Image (cartoon, grey):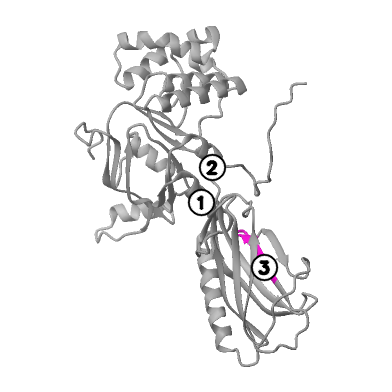
Amino acid sequence: MDKKRENITEDIMIEINHLSKVYHLYDKPIDRLREALSLTHKSYHKEHFALNDVNIQIKKGESIGIVGVNGSGKSTLLKIITGVLNPTQGEVVTKGKIAALLELGAGFNPEYTGIENIYLNGTMMGYTEEEMKERVQAIVDFADIGDFVYQPVKTYSSGMFARLAFAVSINVDPEILIVDEALSVGDTRFQIKCMQKMKEMMQGGTTVLFVSHDINAIRRFCTKIVWLRKGQVQEEGDVNAISDRYLDFLKIGDEYFDEMMTKQDEEVEKKKEENENVIAEILSFKMLDEEGKEVNKVGLNQPVKVEVEYQVYDDSIEKPVLGIAIRSMDDDYVCGLNSLLDQQKVSWKLGKNRMTLTYPHGILAVGGQYYFDVALFEETATVPIQYISVVKKFTIQSGYAGEGRYIIPHKWEESNE
């Protein structure tokens, strides 16, 4: 693998081409020996793809958030980029010095003092002793561990060790900084200092790869996101949109949702074929913007309305009820409205009828995927004439407007009295 090459496109700092990492898994330890000694080259292992044909380009100055559940390939990818692991196939091409916060202090010698380890790490990054002399004081000041910097590292507490390791990694002017869940070191003041330094580096043009399970930290720091799933790139691009979809995935899993949608489509088609004895039938359900255009995506505060068209075969039902509910992908009941609660008369004449429900201030839930349920009931809203689950899936695009489940209308004011 060509690990570093200076002739890649000027604005590309990391280029990952068809990258795969395969591990051989054995049911029993003895199987490894059997395979090695087999005269017929019989295979006793199963192949596990930690990474499978990954292709990513990272430009100079980009801050890339990498997300994925445990086992999705995040750490494997970072270790190959930094040279800790070799790929099975493909290549990673990098340009410039890399500082990696994967396992803090991994390159430290416990017998050396803090100062000696500073020089040692600088040498490993390609700096000369003279170049490191210019950086030592800044590193010592940032770590702020006092005279312990002149003591062997093996005498340090875990907190002091982490502070020095972090200080070394981010104060050597790297062109690429790789961070893997390593920002929770030291006390609160030190964490604040780390965050400020990270922001300075990002604003100064350092290319950053940031792995975190804290999706809100990804939203705050990153300009782009890469979602890894089962060793492959599931999605990459806009931070907020993909973060929303990733959170939905964490709630229920996308395979389950696809299965649910397919099943619902089949049920709707089946009901349409069996309409001989039905009282009424929902024909269509549309989500419309202010101009009457059908949409599948809406902004947080964007006024929107839904239009329900239904066919009435029996007009003897007195005071029928129309209900519309919104649920999230994990089946959280966001909002359920019906005409009985709102004392609204529902059109009920033989033939086609249409009703609309307007949300004048938008649907004030955090970004992500949601779906509508729709139902026609008799007058007590107890017996369903027809109930359709997941009649329409839609996306709320809220950006990073807040945290939690809902964005409650609010107002900030200064109060210094």
Q: Tell which circle, 3 or 1, labels the residue nearer the N-terminal end.
A: 1
| Label disc, if present, on residue 141 of the rendered structure | none
Q: In screen coordinates, is 347 left or right of 218?
A: right
Q: Residue furthest left?
A: 7
Type of residue at label 3?
A: Ile
Q: Which quadrant holds the N terminus?
A: top left
Q: Position of residue 32 (x, y in %)?
A: 36, 52
Q: What stretch of residues is rendered in magenta?
A: 323-331
Number of marks present in the image shown: 3
Choose mark 3 or mark 2, whichever is in front. 3
Asked whether residue 110 is drawn in magenta, I would say: no
Determine whether 202 is above or below 349 in the image: above
* CA separation in Å, label 3 and label 2: 31 Å
Q: Residue furthest right?
A: 380
| Label disc, if present, on residue 246 of the rendered structure | 1
Q: Nearer the viewer, residue 216 or 53?
A: 216
Q: In screen coordinates, is 72 left or right of 35?
A: right
Type of residue at label 2?
A: Ile
Choose mark 3 or mark 1, whichever is in front. 3
Which residue was labeled with disc 3?
324
User: Residue drawn at (75%, 70%), measured in percent from left and top?
Assistant: 344
**Residue 188 visible in rendering:** yes
Quadrant in which residue 78 is drawn: top left
Quadrant in which residue 273 is drawn: bottom right
Q: Position of residue 333 (x, y in %)?
A: 68, 60
Q: Tell which circle, 3 or 2, labels the residue nearer the N-terminal end.
A: 2
Determine whether 112 is above or below 308 in the image: above
Q: Are marks 3 and 2 in contact (CB under 8 Å)?
A: no
Which residue was labeled with disc 2?
215
Q: Main secondary structure of the magenta part?
A: strand
Q: Position of residue 257 (x, y in %)?
A: 54, 64
